[in-house]
């Protein structure tokens, strides 16, 4: 399972880097603009479902690591969980109801989780930077029992999930603003 989680994180990174490169490159290249438009069309209407699945897999993965593998979460891991766990029902309900108004809340939670994950990953790689007693002796933030390939740790995997959720919400925003999209919520869904 550890390798599986690391592979998922790597795939999330490839997706995020690919999306960023295509979106930036589309400003300068007609070919990349066409690819961006094809990505828009193929993801249109499914961005929230994909983000929901990412949040669900991250949540289930963290529960697996703590409850099955018995890894004790450190304080920063708990903060990352606080940001990730609510994304499951928020994105699930938004996907089911086609509610595009939830995007700013999802992005805010994911951005907070991303910032905490980055800080945690830096502390793991540079333990001398840990100050202020943010972690305990029983579950130090500098330790991680899951170092795959020498760089994929639990905070790195969380960072990958948060980054992919944000990227999917950016794609959803772009799709909501496209001229052929109806960004309004279906009135039948609200009632």
Image (spheres, rainbow, N blue to C red):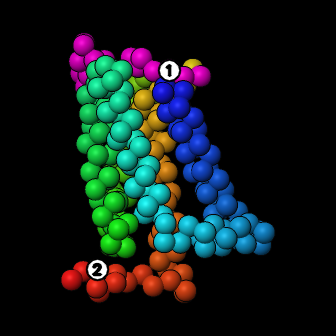
Q: Name the residue at 34% across, 81% down.
A: 185
Q: Position of residue 31 (x, y in %)?
A: 78, 69
Q: Which residue is mark 2?
A: 189
Q: Is residue 116 in view from this perspective?
A: no
Residues under labels 1 and 2: Cα distance? 45 Å
Q: Position of residue 122 (x, y in %)?
A: 45, 29
Front residue of 11 and 27: 11
Q: Position of residue 140 (x, y in %)?
A: 31, 17
Q: Is residue 138 above or below residue 16?
A: above
Closer to the chain start, of discs 1 and 2, is: 1
Residues shaded magenta: 131-149
Magenta part, dominant SS: loop
Q: Is residue 94 in view from this perspective?
A: yes
Q: Is residue 4 above or below residue 31?
A: above
Q: Which residue is mark 1?
A: 147
Q: Element at badge 2?
A: helix
Q: Is residue 82 left or right of residue 168?
A: left
Q: Element at badge 1?
A: loop
Q: Name the residue at 28% across, 17% down.
A: 139
């Amino acid at each position: 399972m550890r390798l599986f989680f690391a592979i998922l994180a790597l795939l999330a990174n490839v997706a995020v880097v690919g999306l960023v490169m295509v979106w930036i490159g589309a400003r300068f290249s007609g070919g990349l603009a066409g690819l961006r438009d094809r990505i828009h069309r193929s993801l249109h209407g499914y961005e929230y479902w994909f983000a929901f699945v990412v949040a669900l897999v991250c949540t289930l993965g963290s529960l697996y690591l703590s409850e099955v593998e018995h890894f004790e979460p450190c304080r920063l891991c708990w903060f990352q969980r606080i940001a990730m766990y609510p994304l499951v029902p928020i994105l699930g309900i938004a996907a089911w109801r086609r509610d595009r108004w939830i995007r700013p809340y999802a992005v805010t939670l994911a951005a907070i989780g991303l910032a905490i994950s980055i800080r945690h990953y830096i502390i793991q790689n540079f333990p001398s930077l840990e100050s202020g007693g943010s972690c305990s002796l029983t579950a130090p933030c500098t330790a991680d029992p899951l170092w795959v390939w020498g760089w994929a740790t639990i905070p790195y995997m969380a960072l990958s999930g948060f980054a992919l959720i944000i990227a999917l919400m950016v794609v959803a925003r772009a799709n909501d603003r496209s001229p052929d999209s109806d960004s309004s919520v279906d009135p039948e869904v609200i009632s």
